Image (tube, rainbow, N blue to C red):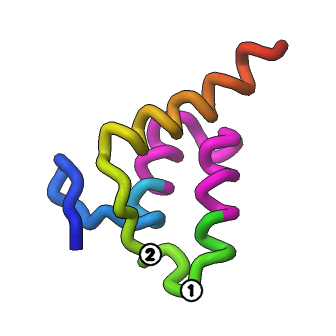
Amino acid sequence: MRKLSTGSDATLGTYRQLTVALFGEDSKAVKFLDDKIDSSTYRENEEVLAPESQMLYLLTNIHFQERIHV
């Protein structure tokens, strides 16, 4: 299992927890992760193979994209 820089497992569930802490439950980035979890065989325990830096970039862009189009 890959690990994040925090020492936590790199799973969809871990990324969801981090994203909620950073952006709040109503973020589109959380919705994105919820959709991935819903479609995953292993649900929140699905391992994320993408590097941590790419995931943070992706989730940040998804979150702030909703703010740009106001």
Q: Give the quarter of the image for residue 17.
A: bottom left
> What residue occupies the far right of the structure in this picture?
70
Cβ–Cβ under 8 Å for marks 2 and 1: yes
Mark 2 residue element: loop
Please indicate whether residue 34 sits to the left or right of residue 47 in the image.
Answer: right
Magenta stretch encompasses residue 21: yes
| In this view, 30 is above or below 63 | below
Q: Is residue 36 left or right of residue 8?
A: right
What is the crowding at mark 1: few (fewer than 14 residues within 10 Å), some, or many (at least 20)? few
Dominant SS of magenta comes to: helix
Residue on which the image places disc 1: 41
| Quarter location, residue 47 | bottom left
Residue 40 in magenta stretch: no
Please tell me whether residue 32 is drawn above or below residue 39 in the rendered image: above
Task: Please tell me how many numbered marks the rendered image carries.
Answer: 2
The reply, left or right, for residue 47 in relation to residue 5 is right
Quarter of the figure with residue 37: bottom right
Residue type at numbered disc 2: Glu
**What residue is shown with label 2?**
46
Residue at figure coordinates x 22%, y 74% from the top left: 1
Distance from label 2 to label 1 (Cα)? 8 Å
Residue at horizontal 59 percent and vertical 57 percent from the top: 33
Label placed on residue 28: none
For the record, the magenta segment spans 16-35
Against 45, is 57 above or below?
A: above
Q: Residue at x 62, y 23 (%)?
A: 64
Helix, strand or loop at label 1? It is loop
Give the percent coordinates (x, y) of residue 41.
Answer: 56, 86
In the image, is 17 to the left or to the right of 41?
left
**Looking at the figure, which quarter contains the C terminus?**
top right
Binning the other alpha carbons within 10 Å of mark 2 as few (below 14), some (14 to 19) or many (20 upward) gives: some
